[in-house]
Image (cartoon, rainbow, N blue to C red):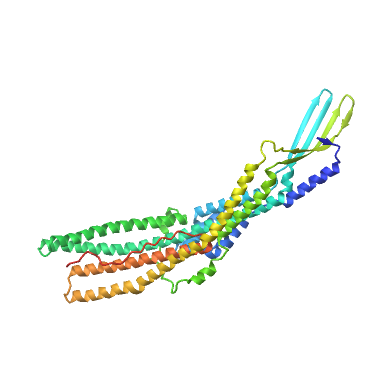
Amino acid sequence: MISGFDLRHTRLALCLAALATLSGCASVTYEQNLDRVNEETNHFAGGKVSLARNADERNQRASSAEKLLSAPLGQKEAVQLAMANSYSLQALLAQGWAESADAAQSGRISNPVFSFERLVATDELELGRALSFGLLDVLTLPARQGIAQRRIGQAQLRLASEVVDHVTRVRQAWVRAVAAEQTLEYAKQVFESAEAGAELARRMQSAGNFNRIARAREQAFYADSATRLAAASHDVTARREDLVRLLGLDESQAQSLKMPTRLPDLPSEALNPDAVGRIATTARLDIRLARFALEVSSKAQGLNLVTSFTDIELTARRNTKFDNAAGTRSDPRGYEIGIRLPVFDWGGMQRDAWSARTLAAANQLESTVRSAGSSLRESYSAYRTTYDIAKHYRNEIVPVRKVISDENQLRYNGMIIGIFELLADARDQVNAVMGAINAEQQFWLADAALQASLIGRPTTTSLSVITSLPGAAGAGH
């Protein structure tokens, strides 16, 4: 304890500390958080997200959802419905706000500690008052403020990335749900054709006009068609419920959900590589997130070089001492400085840990930059391949199957071929249409993945193309 210190100097130091505290407070509101997220994702999502915090805002969301559900839900409307109605997305927004608030808190100075003591000894009464605060907290406040701002930006970009992920999943789930409905309709046609063929084969065998193996082929195709129909029926339910979960629909809303009867038409032209390259810039979310992580680690490492060695606490004291026997009073004042001595721990492990984190962040940034181009090229390859395949189905395979079907109908009318050949051709045509539906589905899935990759949130894209080959059923008739 060093006493006799001028009270004016003590007050000045405390005022400076209070001023630094007030001017250096980091803060972020939920409006600021959402504004940043919407700025990053508005063009990608085609709308803005909002966080409902009271009953009125929740009612507005419910009203918007009801309006969107009143008509068949297109892909764009599905995204709007998710942003208005999805509780999982609301949870992401609330969690993102919490992360930003935690990041802002890390840039604030710790509250000072006030202590009061009362000591009595015979005729003497002593009242002690002390105000303590961490001196290093004040001295390092600008550095911690800068780190906090970067962490806030990092949390906001991470939230924007989560919103992009959710929108991408909604788009792809919508594509799968619509394609499943289309596929089911054609699976029913194949089943009906197979059922008719199997029944006809049974009757002809009973009449002695059909051999056993030929009838068995028709029966096997019928059994296979029934299995495919059952699987297609379940796939409709599974794909629809996947979309329902992503949209956050309750049971009554799910019953009101109406889907379009078919996928959108293919674009007249596919995006060219040059246009994709211009869109994908260094403003990608993944690169900026990695850069923020490196900046935070670098700044924190510099700050840790000081704080890992020691800590300093400054305390201003004022005591009042009453001597009842002598009838006197004294008011000693002063301050004390407490320094943590690096005797047992010199903070070497802490500094090594921060150095390792900075090195990891630097390498992660370089890895992200190098992977960005690769993932974009892969996504574009999937996009362009699926576009070309879907266009090939539309312009070549389906029209050719239609010509074959028309010619076989004429041949059947001229009694050149029989009913089983006509049924087999009808199945081949339906299979070609189902292949075209699958190709269109793969294109729109790849399109959603490419859009996510352009903004910097790559999504794994896998191709699954169904080829159109003549059916085995009816062969040899």
On the rendered structure, is 207 left or right of 59? left
The picture places residue 88, in percent across and down from the top left corner, at 50, 53
Above or below for 425 versus 83: below
On the rendered structure, is 380 left or right of 331? left
The picture places residue 436, in percent across and down from the top left corner, at 35, 68
Specify the farthest residue to the left: 208
- Viewer-side residue, 470 vs 427: 470
Quarter placement of the C terminus: bottom left
- Viewer-side residue, 356 vs 246: 356
The picture places residue 66, in percent across and down from the top left corner, at 48, 60
The picture places residue 348, in percent across and down from the top left corner, at 64, 42
The number of numbered badges drawn on the structure is: 0
Q: Is residue 441 visible?
A: yes
Above or below for 335 versus 258: above
On the rendered structure, is 137 left or right of 103? right
Image point (26%, 58%), residue name: 226
Q: Is residue 72 visible?
A: no
Quarter placement of the N terminus: top right
Image point (47%, 65%), residue name: 377
